Amino acid sequence: MRHETLHCLGPNGFHRLSYTEWGEMKEAAPILYTYEKGAAGKMNPAASWRPKVVFRSKTTAPYVPAE
C-alpha cells in the first residue's frame, strides 16, 4: 500500500489531491466521488453532507504479468 499526494491546477488555483494505491485487487471496480451538502440519510444521519458518485468503473481484471 502506498499513499501519495500531488498538487493539481484548477480554475481557482492549485489544490492538493491525495490517493492510496492498494495494489492489485480481484475484480476491482474503482469509484470516484465527491461530497455535497445535504442529508446523508442512513449512512450518517448526523452529517450535513453526503457522497456523490462522479464515475463508477466497470469491474476490472487483475494484471497478470507474462512469464
Image: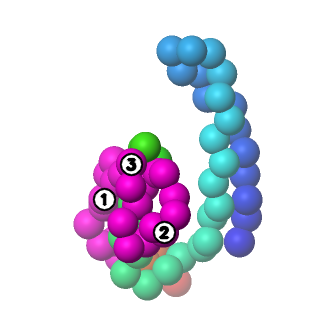
Q: Quadrant of residue 14?
A: top right
10 Å neighbourhood of mark 2: few (<14), some, or many (≥20)? Answer: few
Question: Which circle, 2 or 1, is nearer the viewer?
Answer: 2
Say if 26 sits above or below 57 in the image.
Answer: below
Q: Quadrant of residue 51?
A: bottom left
Q: Which residue is mark 1?
A: 56
Residue at 26% from the left image edge and 66% from the top image edge: 58
Q: Is there a contact, CB below 8 Å, between mark 2 and mark 3?
A: no
x, y percentage for residue 31? 39, 60
Q: Quadrant of residue 27?
A: bottom left
10 Å neighbourhood of mark 3: few (<14), some, or many (≥20)? Answer: few
Q: Amino acid at mark 1?
A: Arg
Q: Which residue is mark 3?
A: 38
Q: Earlier in the sequence, mark 2 or mark 1?
A: 2
Q: Which residue is mark 2?
A: 44
Frontmost residue, 42 versus 54: 42
Say if 61 sits above or below 14 in the image.
Answer: below
In reply to whether residue 47 is colored magenta, the answer given is yes
Q: Amino acid at mark 2?
A: Asn
Frontmost residue, 35 versus 4: 35
x, y percentage for residue 17? 63, 41
Left-right relation of 61 to 58? right
Using the numbered discs, state the Cα–Cα distance from disc 2 to disc 1 in whole angstroms: 22 Å
Q: Which residues lie in the magenta part?
A: 38-61
